[in-house]
Image (tube, rainbow, N blue to C red):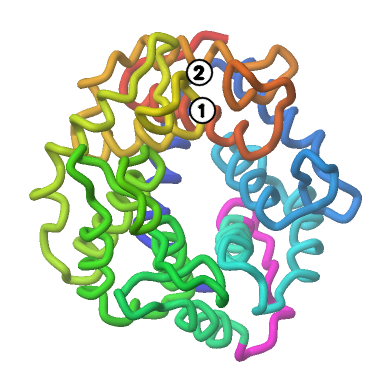
């Protein structure tokens, strides 16, 4: 398999180092949650119980961060991944597949993609490029007419994972910058008028990737102050970040992506970090795993990744959770 992209390597190392500062009891509790979710086919499920590439990707990332991705668990995951190599999969699934396979090889020494056809990587890259639209961005699906900030970011990350150059990175940067709004945030699709935390995080991640790895220059400098102000405005009384100004309560996804973006911009301390930790711990479950928000009633693999990631990110910033 190719080597992971610098963006993902940097993020993975940062979170893993932060989690290494936490008590072993806390790490073991959450690792136990993920390990208990592995299905007999080697994959991991969403809330419906069926193994799914998307959730398997989150579980593999979480276990790698927690240093619990061993050859036994990894070998079973590899068996599942080998059944899901069709290139007609959604770009989210393709990203999950490729990154999970690389983490298995890096963390557990397990090769998951050895059985993939030799032309598979090229076919995947071609499928992703078929999602390119006239405005320079990437759509969610072949049927989609509108480019998406989030799916443009995922498409670029997947191409990097495949060691395939991103075609016309300048046009992609122009699309991303066109998604910025007067409130300082970015939107997911063009008709939206109010910035959102998660598309803003995707936009900043993509601009960072294009600027540092693809010679597009300093793309973040002109937008950084507005993004920082926008994200700081999303911190709620609960301590976490909300998705946008129309949402009254915090959620774990927005908290993780917002804090990561502020960290990347050197502005994490402009929000109240102990309050962020308070929110994350409020949805941390005694048996392991995390709820999505105060309204949630069940843990799942995706939001538990955001919880573990938030704890690791906070610890890397010097705000360390107890057991």
Q: Which residue is mark 2?
A: 280
Pick the front one: 47 or 233: 233
Mark closer to the chain start, 1 or 2: 1
Horizontal placement of 109 versus 243: left or right? right
- Determine whether, in the image, residue 140 is placed left or right of residue 217: right
Q: Residue at x 70, y 33 (%)?
A: 300
Single out the residue that lies furthest toward the right.
Answer: 40
- Whole-percent x, y for residue 17 in the image: 42, 33
- Look at mark 1 in the image and give the residue it sits on: 252
Task: Give the image quarter of residue 142.
Answer: bottom right
Q: Is 107 one of the magenta-colored residues?
A: yes
Task: Identify the image quadrant of the C terminus.
Answer: top right
Q: Main secondary structure of the magenta part?
A: loop
Across and down, in percent, residue 120 comes to 62, 84
State the extent of the magenta-drawn residues as a range: 104-119
Q: What element does badge 1 sit on?
A: helix
Q: Are marks 1 and 2 in contact (CB under 8 Å)?
A: yes
Q: Which mark is residue 200?
A: none
Identified at 69% across, 87% down, the residue is 117
Residue name at image x 32 percent, y 81 percent: 167
Q: Nearer the viewer, mark 1 or mark 2?
A: 1
At x 42%, y 68%, the residue is 146
> What is the crowding at mark 2: few (fewer than 14 residues within 10 Å), some, or many (at least 20)?
many
């Amino acid at each position: 398999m190719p080597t992971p992209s610098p963006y993902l390597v940097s993020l993975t190392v940062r979170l893993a180092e932060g989690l290494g500062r936490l008590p072993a009891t806390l790490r073991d509790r959450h690792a136990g949650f993920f390990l208990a979710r592995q299905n007999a086919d080697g994959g991991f499920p969403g809330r419906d119980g069926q193994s799914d590439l998307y959730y398997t990707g989150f579980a593999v990332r979480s276990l790698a961060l927690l240093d619990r991705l061993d050859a036994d668990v990894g070998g079973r995951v590899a068996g599942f991944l080998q059944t899901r190599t069709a290139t007609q999969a959604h770009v989210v699934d393709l990203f999950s597949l490729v990154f999970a396979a690389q983490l298995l090889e890096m963390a557990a020494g397990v090769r998951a993609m050895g059985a993939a056809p030799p032309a598979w990587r090229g076919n995947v890259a071609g499928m992703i490029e078929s999602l390119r639209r006239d405005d320079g961005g990437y759509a969610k699906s072949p049927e989609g007419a509108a480019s998406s900030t989030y799916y443009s970011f995922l498409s670029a990350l997947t191409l990097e994972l495949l060691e395939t150059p991103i075609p016309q990175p300048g046009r992609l940067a122009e699309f991303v910058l066109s998604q910025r709004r007067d409130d300082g945030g970015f939107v997911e699709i063009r008709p939206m008028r109010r910035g959102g935390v998660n598309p803003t995080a995707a936009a900043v991640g993509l601009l960072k990737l294009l600027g540092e790895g693809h010679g597009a220059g300093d793309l973040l400098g002109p937008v950084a102050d507005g993004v920082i102000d926008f994200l700081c405005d999303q911190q709620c009384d609960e301590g976490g970040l909300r998705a946008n100004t129309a949402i009254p309560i915090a959620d774990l996804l927005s908290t993780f992506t917002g804090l990561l973006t502020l960290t990347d911009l050197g502005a994490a301390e402009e929000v109240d970090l102990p309050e962020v930790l308070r929110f994350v711990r409020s949805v941390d479950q005694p048996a392991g795993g995390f709820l999505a928000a105060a309204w949630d009633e069940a843990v799942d693999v995706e939001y538990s990744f955001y919880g573990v990631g938030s704890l690791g990110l906070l610890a890397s910033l010097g705000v360390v959770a107890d057991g």
